[in-house]
Image: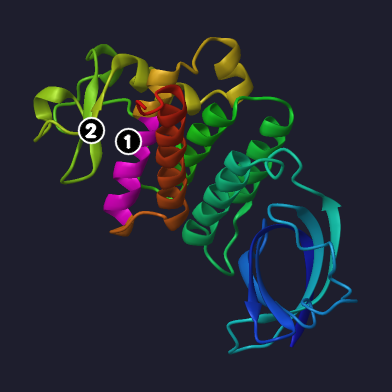
Amino acid sequence: MRILSGEAILLDTMDLQERDRVVTFLTAEWGKKRGVAKGARTKFSRFAGQLQPLSKVAVRWFEKEGRDLVRIESVELVEPCRALLDDLDGILLASYLAEHLVTFAQENEDSESFYRLLDGTLRWIEQGVDRDLAARYFEVWVLRLAGIFPPPRECPVCGRALADAGGAAIDPAGPEIRCRECTTGAEGRLSAAAISFLLRTAREAPPAIAQNGGGASGVLREIEKACAQVRTCFLHQELRSYQVMQATLRRERELAREVAEPPPD
C-alpha cells in the first residue's frame, strides 16, 4: 500500500451503498483517480461540504496494488467552482466539462496538460470570459490532447494550406479536416472563420481570442458541431452530459416560443 497526496479537481461523485461515495478526481501527476470516501453520506462526515463539483481540493488517498478504487483519507476544499454552479446552464456546462476528463483522461498517467486545461478554463470563466467561447476552446483542446483533432494547417490529402482554402470540411471517414475538394460528403462544413478560430486556439487563450473578436456566435456553433462530430466518431457515442444539455436547451427554446406566441382563445 502507498499513501499519496496532492492537488486535484473533483470531476464526479456517486453514491455507494448507504454511507459512502465514489469520487472521481483529476490530478496533474497521477492522472484520473477513483476512490471511496467512507462515510461521506453520513450527517457528520468529515467530507461534508468538501465534495463540490469541479472544486479544487487537497486530497490524500491510499492505494493498494490490484484494486481499481483507492481509499480517500481526506479532502480539503481549496477553491470552489463558483462561476458555474449558480444557474442551470452553468451546472449543465460543469457536468459537460467534467465528463470530458472522466472520458479522455487516463488513470495512473501524467495528466498535467488536461489538468491545466480544466483549471485554466474554470479560471477564465470565473474572470468573465464568455462561457460559450471557453467551452469551445476547452472541447477543441481536449480532442487535440487526445491526438484526434490537430490544428487544421494543411489538407492531409493534397497538402493545400487550409487557411487559404476559403473553408474546409470534416471528412466523415476520418474524421480529419480536409479542403472541400478532398472531402467526401457534404456534412461537417467549416467556414474560413471557423478554420481561423481553430488555428487561433493553438496559439491564443480565450481572453485574447475574445479581445480580438474571435467569438462570433455563428463560428462557435460551427466549432461545437465539429467537435461533436469528431468526438462521436472517436467514441462511437456522444457524451451523456452533452445530450442532456442539448435536450434542455431545446426545451427552453420551446417554452420561450410558447410564451412569445400564446395559443389563440
- In this image, 168 relative to 92: left or right? left
Q: How was this image coloured?
A: rainbow
Q: Is residue 166 left or right of residue 84?
A: left
x 36%, y 21%: residue: 194
Mark 2 falls on what kind of element? loop
Which disc is residue 105 wearing? none
Q: Quadrant of residue 130?
A: top right
Give SS at disc 1. Answer: helix
* Marks 1 and 2, the one that precedes in the sequence: 2
Q: Is residue 181 visible?
A: yes
Q: Quadrant of the C terminus?
A: top left
Q: Is residue 149 visible?
A: no
Q: Please tell me which residue is depicted at 77% across the width and 76% down the height of the picture.
A: 61
- Give above or below for 186 relative to 100: above
Judge whether residue 70 is colored magenta: no
For disc 1, the marked residue is 226
Residue at x-position 68% and y-position 80%? 70
User: Which residues are drawn in magenta?
Assistant: 223-234
Percent across and percent down for residue 167 are 24, 18
> In x, y percent, where is residue 1?
74, 88
| Residue 228, image x, y percentages | 35, 43
- Neighbours of disc 2 within 10 Å: few (<14), some (14-19), many (20+): many
Quadrant housing residue 87 = top right
Q: In the image, 250: left or right of 86? A: left
Residue bearing the label numbered 2: 188
Answer yes or no: do the residues labelled 1 and 2 have beta carbons within 8 Å?
yes
Query: Is the residue 185 above or below the residue 77 in the image?
Result: above
Name which residue type carries label 2: Gly
Mark 1–mark 2 distance (CA, rounded to whole Å): 6 Å
Q: Amino acid at mark 1?
A: Ala
Placement of 115 over or under 125, stated as above or below: below
